[in-house]
Image: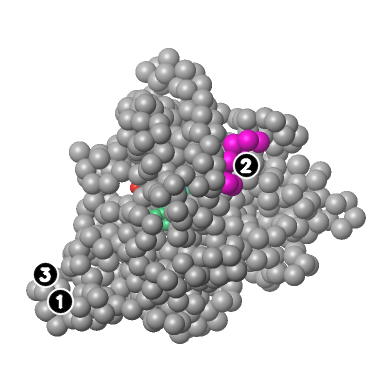
Amino acid sequence: MRAIEAAAAPVAETQLQNDWNTALPYEKISGPSRLTLIKDSLPGGKFTTLNLGDVMEQYRQQYGNIFKMPGMLGKPETVLVFDPKDFEAIYRTEGVWPFRPSLETITYYRRKVRPDIFSTGGLGVEQGKEWAEFRAAVNPVMMQPKIVKQYVPQIDKFMDEFIVRVKKIRDSNTYELPENFEEELNRWSLEAICIIALDTRLGVMGKLDKNSKEHEFINAVKRFFYLISVLDLKPSMWKVFPTPDFKEMMRVLDVITDFSFHHVDEAKKRLESQVNTKSEKEQSVLEKLIKINPKVATIMATDIVMAGVDETSSAVTTVLFTLAKNPDKQEILRNELRKILPEKDSPLTPQNMSNLPYLRACIKESLRVLPVVIGNSRKTGKDLVLKGHKVPKGTNVLLVSAHTQVDERLYTGGEKFIPERWLKNQESELSKEAKSVSPFTFLPFGFGPRMCIGRRFAELEIEVFISKIIRNFYVGWERPDLKFKTVGINVPDGKLQFKIKDVEN
Ligand code: HEM
């Protein structure tokens, strides 16, 4: 098996042992009781009236920076942590095969409902050796910047089409984008990810028949993320009996799986005959994956299409929104872009994209102030002491970073959008501060061997999208601030009526 990414430096055994011997017992970690959880899950309770992230924050204010959510209805007990020092302790001891508890509904679906086609559960479902072998097979294709960058010209060309579309659909008097712009963005990211993962143009921009498979797929992905929050993240009865939400989840997963498998099969038929005639350099991501193992290729491509739509469009929304709210920063970015794109329709290339520090700082800062994910999870890889308590190896832990990463005590102007703090060559107090804050505070794509495998794809898509939009348009926001809601990931909770006016030159 090829080596996967190096895990974090291990922590000295003797230190762990000493801390352990003097720590408080696990049972002393406080937290809401089962009864409280049931009460908070009933209609009108916290879980139905508040965002999941806000429920966690309320519990944190009540119980402190570590608390336990009791196991119930077949879900295991989980310890929630909020301190970057504890994030670091967990990541540094996760080992080379980190265990991230998988979503139980999708695991059930792949193992029990469709084992005929899922010979392996894929990265999101498998653990241990099975996960490591899959990850080692796909890592060299998915995580290599050189391979991903070959898609810049295609995504750039697609972006030119999107710009024409945006001009067409905006209101010709107010310049506002239409109420359904979120759907346009979802279609944009589906089209973009299929260019990368399936070597195919779906052609979903423009008029899309409401009865089409593409429309059904996009809606299914939306429902999938919503149902994760209901069935996997909040207390739910589905393990006791198949609730209507659970039945819908199984239907939604059928739609997603059938759509992806169909397109992967089509792409495979097109490509399989050519794989051996192309040089290594000419081969696409899918061709490379097929060459490694056709079964791995199908499951990986399915996961790419499934994970690559809502997360990326949500990230693009947060970057656009923060730039719209900060026109001065937007202008600095536009000036950086003018240097590599002298004309509004100048093409992006892997070469000219290599020098865009302000763009990257804007994206990083947007993901800090408006995160797409509220945190990450693991099973602890060793006995650990967290906030003075023993937490045994194999405990489910949720590392909640959404509030920590905007904490004023760590980042001056915590909730403010200040991309300059991430510029490496700056000697300002803010950038010195950002360098001194623990990197474990803010890990939008996770950490270590198990970090997001789609990171390079997502970054490429976001960078191309934002570059072309900001080079072409002044993006404004004149409505009450956009809100976000947590449905598995954070997604916009409102209409994306950005105002876009053409840049003169
Ligand atoms: C801005 C967009 C995205 C964000 C913020 C994001 C975030 C994350 C995070 C936090 C994890 C958990 C990492 C860990 O456990 O340390 C993850 C895992 C994963 N992501 Fe993403 N992701 C994004 C886009 C994508 C895309 C476009 C794809 C598909 C190409 C993708 C596929 C995956 C997969 C398959 C995993 C599981 C990896 C494993 O367990 O080995 N993600 N992502």
Q: Amino acid at mark 2?
A: Asn
Which residue is denoted by mark 1 in the rendering? 20
Q: Quick check: 457 above or below 392?
A: above
Q: Which residues are magenta?
A: 215-223
Quadrant of the image occupied by residue 300:
top left
Taking depth in this image into account, of 134 and 379 the one nearest to the observer is: 379
- Whether residue 347 appears in this view of the structure is no
Q: As shown in the figure, which amino acid type bears the numbered disc 1?
A: Trp
Please tell me how crowded label 2 is: few (under 14), some (14-19), or many (20+) other residues with Cα within 10 Å: some
Residue 223 x/y as whole percent: 58, 46
* Secondary structure state at the residue bearing disc 2: helix
Between marks 1 and 3 in the image, the one whose residue lies nearer the viewer: 1
Q: CA distance from mark 2 to mark 1?
A: 49 Å
Tag 3: residue type?
Glu
Q: Position of residue 492 (x, y in %)?
A: 63, 59
Q: Nearer the viewer, residue 4 or 246?
A: 246
Q: Pick the quarter of the image with the N terminus.
A: top left
- Determine whether 213 is above or below 123 in the image: above
Q: Looking at this view, is 371 or 330 the one in front?
A: 371
Badge 2 residue CB within 8 Å of ligand 1: no
Q: Which residue is the site of mark 3?
A: 13
- Does 454 appear in magenta? no
Q: Does the residue tagged 1 have its C-beta within 8 Å of any atom of ligand 1? A: no
Q: Going by the image, does 388 lie left or right of 151?
A: left
Q: Which residue is mark 2?
A: 219
> Are circles 2 and 1 on residues that touch, CB within 8 Å?
no
